[in-house]
Amino acid sequence: MTYTFEDFLTKTNSEDTVTLELKKNNKKTGQSLEVSGVEAKSVSNSRIKWQVSRAAIAEKYKDEKDQSILLTEKKQEDEVINIDFAMVLVKEWSFGELDKKMLFQLLEENDGLAWAIIAIAYGHEAKHKKK
């Protein structure tokens, strides 16, 4: 089946996935993650929980001036909720059957990967909304 551009211009495609290619030392590895859009019904509860958690963390640290605390404690709290949400967004991967323990390890050991997955998921939605 051939899809046209218009086939991708509705929110009903939120359950579709987008591919996030994994690179090592800025080189293609042939490995990838399949990420759902943030508006997908299958992730809606997790998206709301993530948004509420982000707001709570921002509120908790809004008056903090100590950069060392912001760079350690706040960053760690942000990363925990980002990993939790990224775990829900990843639907498949190229390593075979999706193993949640291994996915968690991958996200935990690669700073910023969880945030990249979330950004891809939000970008996926922006491409699918009608103007």
Image (cartoon, rainbow, N blue to C red):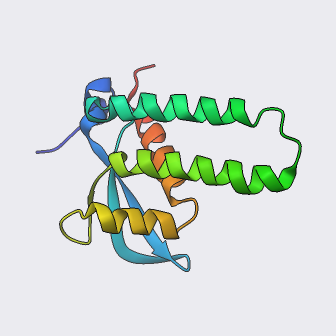
> 16 above or below 69?
above
Point out the residue furthest to the right here: 65
Left-right relation of 110 to 38:
right
- Residue at 32 percent across and 25 percent down: it is 11
The percent coordinates of residue 131 (x first, y second) are 46, 19
Q: Look at 27% across and 32% down and name the residue there.
A: 13
Please tell me which residue is depicted at 71% across the width and 33% down the height of the picture: 60
Eyeballing the image, is 2 above or below 113? above
Quarter where residue 65 is shown: top right
Residue nearest the observer in this picture, 23 or 104? 104
Residue at figure coordinates x 72%, y 57% from the top left: 72
Quadrant of the drawing holding the N terminus: top left
Q: In the picture shown, does residue 60 fall above or below 115?
A: above
Q: Position of residue 25 (x, y in %)?
A: 55, 80
In the image, 6: left or right of 68?
left
Residue 52 picture location, percent across and down: 53, 28
The quarter holding residue 31 reads bottom left
Residue lying furthest left: 1
Image coordinates of residue 73 in percent, x first then y, are 70, 52
The mark tally for this picture is 0
Q: Is residue 37 left or right of residue 77?
A: left
Rendering quarter of residue 104: bottom left
Residue nearest the observer in this picture, 48 or 61: 61
